[in-house]
Image (cartoon, coloured by chain):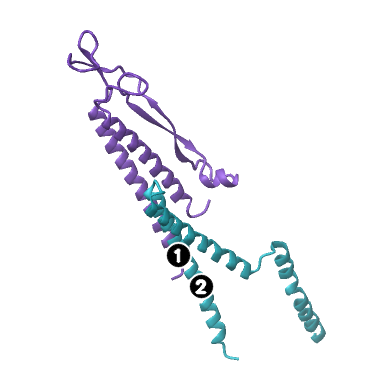
Chain colours: A purple, B cyan
Amino acid sequence: MNIFTAMQISSSGLKAQRTRLNVISANMANMETTQTPEGGPYRKQDVFFEAVKTATERDSGVRGEKGVREVGVYDVAPNPRPFRMVRDPEHPDADENGIVLMPNVNPMEEMVDMMSATRAYEANVTAVKAAKRMALKALEIGR
Amino acid sequence: MESVGLSSLIGMANAGPGPQEGQAEKGGRGFADVLQSSVEKVNDAQLQADEAVGKLHSGEAKNIHEVTIALEQADISLRLMVKMRNKAMDAYQEIMRMQV
């Protein structure tokens, strides 16, 4: 509950958005991947966030301000949507009918998610800047 | 009248340091201790920022923002310390300027 709490919380937000961007990058990179270690084509991954106690609250056990929570990634899970079916008999992964299962990644959706992640990241950076401005303004008291 | 004035003065002289000592014992922290610990905290922040920059250069740090935020925190705590130092110096100089 000191002046740096806001910065720590924004830091968790920045970290979460970075994780999200990493997963989006993986989805984009594997847009056409037809083979995975688990077998079958690549499955789109989704990131899920949760509100967690602040770092100071976790470390010291002291109860922080009410309702003040950091963000954390609680799961990165595969999307259950069905795979795209493409007819390509020459493809090594094609079945007897010449159909290839392609990943259930929608590039348009990924682009929108990426923009949303970028904007959320920027918003967190702005929050850090605001926290710094407030701290510096407090130091100007009595000048 | 005189004796009343004197005794009340003596009473004040006796009472004066009493609660202060009690407070110091209770809290166990004088101004010097507070100053010491805050300077140590500022130093810790500087060291943390230093370490974070080192980690960034060696490729150990995975998040740039953690480094920049550590730098900002070190910056703000240093500014606060300088502010405290200026205030203490102002008070000292004010006392030294006093006509005796």
Residue, disc 1: A139
Q: Is residue B90 left or right of residue B10?
A: left
Rendered position, A28 above or below A15: above
Q: Is residue A42 left or right of residue A16?
A: left
Point 42% across, 53% down: residue: B55
Q: Nearer the viewer, residue B59 or A76?
A: B59
- Within 10 Å of the Cα at label 2, are there few (<14), some (14-19), or many (20+) other Cα atoms? few
The image shows residue B61 at horizontal and vertical percentages of 41, 49
Q: Nearer the viewer, residue A109 or B15?
A: A109
The chain letter for the residue carrying disc 2 is B
* Number of marks: 2
Q: Secondary structure at mark 2?
A: helix
Residue, disc 2: B85
The image shows residue B13 at horizontal and vertical percentages of 75, 78
Kindly report the distance in space between the C-alpha atoms of the residues bearing marks 1 and 2: 13 Å
Q: Secondary structure at mark 1?
A: helix
Point 27% across, 29% down: residue: A30
Asked if residue A130 shows in the view, the reply is no
The image shows residue A7 at horizontal and vertical percentages of 44, 51
